[in-house]
Image: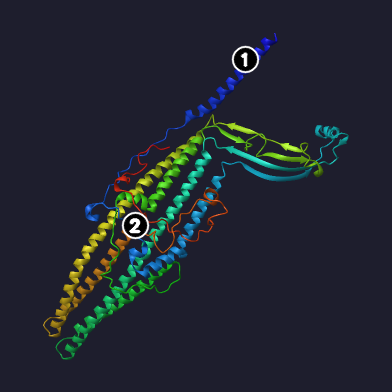
Amino acid sequence: MNRTGRSLNTKHEKHVVARAIACSMLLLVLPSCGIPKLRQAMPGPDLPASYAASFNGPPSLENSSQVPIEDFFNDPKLTSLICQALAGGNLELRILNEDIQIARNEVLGRSGAYLPFVSLGLAAGMERFSRFTPEGTAEEQLEYLPGKHFPGLPGNFLAAFYASWEVDIWRMLRNLRDAAKLRFLATNEGRNYVITRLVAEIAENYYMLMALDKRIENLDNIIALQQQSLEIARARMEAARSTALPVQRFQAEIRKNQSQRLIAQQEIIQVENRINFLVGRYPQPVERNTGDFIDLNLHALSLGVPAQLLLNRPDIRQAERELAAAGLDVKAARARFFPQLAIAGPTGPAGPYSPIGWQAFNPKYLFWTPDALLVSIAGDLITPLINKRAIRADYKTANARQLQAVYNYQRVILNAFTEVVNRVTKVQNYSRSIEVRKQQVTALVAAVEVANDLFRNARIEYIDVLFAQRDLWDARLELIETKQQQLSAIVNVYQALGGGLLGCGRAPRHPQPGPSLTQSPQGGSDPSTTEQLPVPRKQPEQPPEPSKLPTSLPASGAKLE
C-alpha cells in the first residue's frame, strides 16, 4: 500500500515538473510569434573605385587630408589664427565639447543599468494600534522575550540594505549601453567635422582679406592713372585745346573709385571681425601676409582613392556610428517581446526594493542577530501576452530610424564624393581662367599706356582713355576675384578630403566614453576636462593597398537587425 502511494506521488511530481517545463518553454516561444518582420533598406550606389584620370592622374594612395595644417597652407600667420581657434578660442567648439560630455555621461549612466542596485536606508518611527482593533488586542498578548511585552507606544527602527536587479537576459540593457557608446563616438566625429569646416572657413576669410587688400592696391593704381589723365585734360583745357567735359568726366571717375575704396575698407573690417569671431576674440586688426596674391600657391592636391573618404571624412564616420547605434536600438526593442526577469523589481510583492537588514522596536535590540534580522527577496518573470501594440510600435519605430540611418549614411557618402568632384573641377577651371585673365590684364596695361600717350598728343578723345582704364580696372578686379575663388576651392577640396585635423603641434588623442568603462579612476587623465580640443588622428604610417579598400557603401544592402 505504501509502495503504491509513493509511486503515485512520484508520478504526480513528474507530471508537475513536466508541466512547469512546458509552461516555461511556452513563455519563451510564444512571444516571438508576434514579432513584426523588419523592413530592409534599398541598396545604395556603388562607390567608384577611383576619381577621373583628369583629376588625379593614375590611382594613388597619397591624400592631402593627411597633410598637416602648417604644411598645407605654409603661412605662419594663417596657421596661428587656426591654432588659436582650435586651442579653445572658438565658442562653437566649446559648446560641442559639452555635447561630448553629455554623451559621455549618457554612457556612464547606461553602463550601470544592467547591474544590481544596492542602497543603504535608515528609518525610525512610532506606532500604536487601538485596543479595540484586532492588531491592538493581539499586540497586548505578544512577548518579544519571555515575560516581556511590547511597550504601550512601541517604536519601529530599521537599518537595511535595499537591492533590486533587472537581469539582462536578452542583452537589452547592454545593447542600449553599447548604442550610447557609439553615439558618444558619433558626437566626437561630429565635432571633428566642425573642426574641418572651421579650418576651411578661417582660411577662406583670410584669403578674402588678401583679395580685398589687392583690390585696394588696384584701386590706388587706377586712381593714380586717372589723376595723370586728369592733369592732361586740365592742361589741354587751360591751353584752349579742349573743353571742361574731359576734366569733369575724369574727376567723376576718380571720385567713384575713391568711394569704392572706402567700401572695400569697410569690407575688410567686416571680414577681419568675422575671423576674430571664429578665433574667439574681440574686434582687432588681423595680421596677414602681404606678398603677391595673384601668384600665391598652396600645397599640391592629392585626392587618393574615393574609398579613403570612408576613413578620413568625420561626417561619414559619424553617420557610420549612428547607423551601428540604430541597429543596437532595434535589438533592444526586440528584447521587449521576451520575458523579463526582475529581482525585487518595481512590480514585485516586496515593493520597489527588497530590504536586507535589522529591524526592532527599540534601538538596543536593533543589531541582535539573528533575532532582529530582516530578509526579503522576491523575483518576477513577466512576459507580454495580450495587447502588445505599444511594444510593436516601438519596434517598428526603431526599424524606421535604422532605415533613416542607412539612407543618411548613403547620402553622406554620396555628398562627400560629389563635393570632392565639384571642388576639384572648380580648382582646375579657375586655374586655367587665371592664366587667361593674366594675359588679358597684360594686354590692357599696354593698351592704357598707348591710350595715355595718344591722349597726351591729342590724337584720341578722352573717352577712349576712360574706357581703356575702366577695362583695365574690371579685368584686374575679375582676376583678383578669380584668384580668391581658386584659393577658396583649394581650401574646400582639402576640407572635403577630410583635411584640417592634423597640425598645430598637438598630440592626437581620442576621447573615451568614461573612466569606469575604459580605465581605472586611479590612472590616466581626468575625463571631465574637455576644454582642450583633441587633434583627432595620426597620419597612418603605412596606408592599405587600394585593392583592399572598400568600394561600395557598407550596410546599404545588408540585412537589418
Q: Residues within 10 Å of mark 2 (few under 14, many from 20)?
A: many
Which structural element holds mark 2? Answer: helix
Q: Residue furthest bottom?
A: 239
In the image, taking residue 79 as reference, residue 380 lies left or right, namely right
Q: Position of residue 416 (x, y in %)?
A: 33, 52
Residue that carries the numbered disc 1 in the rendered image: 11
The answer to whether residue 397 of the structure is visible from this angle is no
Q: Residue furthest top?
A: 1
Q: Quadrant of residue 491?
A: bottom left
Q: Position of residue 515 (x, y in %)?
A: 54, 51
| Mark 2 residue type | Ser
Residue that carries the numbered disc 2 in the rendered image: 65
In the image, taking residue 273 as reference, residue 18 lies left or right, namely right
In the image, taking residue 302 as reference, residue 239 lies left or right, namely left
- Mark number displayed over residue 416: none
Question: Residue at (57%, 23%) from the top-left corner?
Answer: 21
Question: Residue at (20%, 74%) from the top-left corner?
Answer: 472
Q: Quadrant of residue 422?
A: bottom left
Q: Nearer the viewer, residue 405 or 252?
A: 405
Which structural element holds mark 1? Answer: helix
